Amino acid sequence: MKTLGIIGGLGPLATAYFYRRVVELTPAESDQEHIETWIRSCPSIPDRTAFLLGRSEEDPRPKMVEAGRSLVEAGAEVLAIPCVTAHAFHKDLEEGIGHPILHAIGELGKTLKARGIRTVGVMATDGARASHVYESMLQEYGVSCIWPDEAGQARVMHMIYQDVKAGRIISEGDFTEVGNALLQAGAEAVVLGCTELSQATVTMDLNEDYIDIIDVLAASCVKACMA
Amino acid sequence: MKTLGIIGGLGPLATAYFYRRVVELTPAESDQEHIETWIRSCPSIPDRTAFLLGRSEEDPRPKMVEAGRSLVEAGAEVLAIPCVTAHAFHKDLEEGIGHPILHAIGELGKTLKARGIRTVGVMATDGARASHVYESMLQEYGVSCIWPDEAGQARVMHMIYQDVKAGRIISEGDFTEVGNALLQAGAEAVVLGCTELSQATVTMDLNEDYIDIIDVLAASCVKACMA
């Protein structure tokens, strides 16, 4: 069994939830059957969206590279980052750390392809949207993306920054309105495409129209570590 | 703000939940206001209760010391172990690691004293019970302990090992029967005194008769790191 390394804190609640899902998705009947996991939760890593949009000059990459290197030095063999926006820097991070990192959106692409989904609605940060990280990865799996309209995107950003990152509950009304609009616009499924949005699955009863990227990445980590 | 180091994996779900509570109890409005946290989740650490009861010769201390040392070397300043049974080795671990570790039961003692509680019911492992780790620490705070009867203790062990550690939900009937029996026997409050039992707070609606030791330890970590 391989050791998992998690570059976390982006945000911290998403990291705690991601690790919980790794544990829950691991087939184990006792502590000792679980995966050794090193977590560097570094909430001080500068905001990814602010940097991607040019609103801040604080580059989040050096601290992410430092965290990843320390995990690899400590013995981590499978690396993951439970922050989708950070995947805009995936190539730079792999090069800086000198170790492969599971790609959350690549793993999502495999899941969508297996389910025969060709068009997916994406709820994610402005940074992820502006970087085209979803489109560039999902096109390899024959999947195209639909994003919320301007007001819907602003609501998504509110859920991420004013709700989850500030320790509040996501508004169910806002969430389902944005999700329904994407489904009505032709999305065959809606991806909770920012790890903060997974908190919606904790407080709401979402049907299979919704795919949580944290679950996809956690399942891939378990598979990679148990292989 | 100090860096928190968590010696985890005992069990892994308790570690994920403990970190979630640290995050939730931190006064923060953005990622960057949260506590840097290094977690070594080592579920391969041998079972604490089996060793304490002489049922296994596998000593859990060396791996816990190794995890603690690596956390301190990485920069952790406040150390915590979200496993109450492991506190039977608290002194050995502090000596082996060469760094102080917050004492979950000591922090509980402060909480009980502040609430004016003199008699507490304890739901914890056979290992914690046999080691008298609760009694020896709580007597410093003028608190005495009541434990479940033999059948009740067996039910508690079932909840910990056959339910939580095996990925199942704790039976609400079993839990409340054991808790009620402790309250009827004179306990002024009942402590969820094994970190696995905190999962009961996730699925059940427990009143203030119940004190979760994970919450006590998480609050102390936040206080120590923000000091």
Image (cartoon, coloured by chain):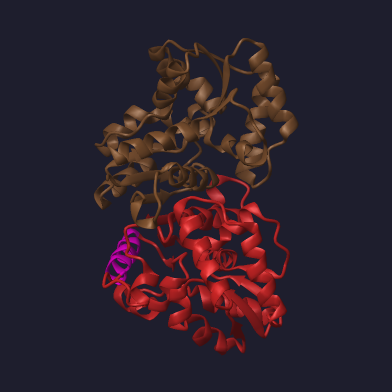
Chain colours: A brown, B red
Question: Where in the figure is residue B107, as x and y percent of width and height?
Answer: 56, 75
Question: Where in the figure is residue B148, as x and y percent of width and height?
Answer: 59, 77
Q: Main secondary structure of the magenta part?
A: helix
Looking at the rendered structure, the number of numbered marks drawn on it comes to 0
- Residue found at the very far front of the displayed protein: B151
Question: Where in the figure is residue B50, as x and y percent of width and height?
Answer: 36, 71
Image quadrant where one finds the C terminus of chain B:
bottom right
Q: Is residue A213 visible?
A: yes
Magenta-drawn stretch contains A107 = no
Q: Which of the pair A171/B27 is nearer the observer?
A: A171
Please indicate whether residue B96 sits to the left or right of residue A86 in the image.
Answer: left
Q: Which residues are magenta?
A: B60-74
Q: Which of the pair A162/A112 is nearer the observer?
A: A112
Q: Which residue is found at the position 38% from the left and 29% from the top?
A: A103
Q: Which of the pair A38/A9 is nearer the observer?
A: A38
Q: Which residue is found at the position 42% from the left and 20% from the top?
A: A109
- Residue found at the very far right of the displayed protein: A173
Query: Is residue A10 placed above or below B1 in the rendered structure?
Result: above
Quarter of the image where one finds residue A113: top left
Query: Is residue A24 placed above or below B94 in the rendered structure?
Result: above
Please indicate whether residue B7 sits to the left or right of residue A160 in the image.
Answer: left
Quarter of the image where one finds residue B215: bottom right
Question: Where in the figure is residue A190, as x and y percent of width and height?
Answer: 58, 22
Q: Is residue A53 visible?
A: no
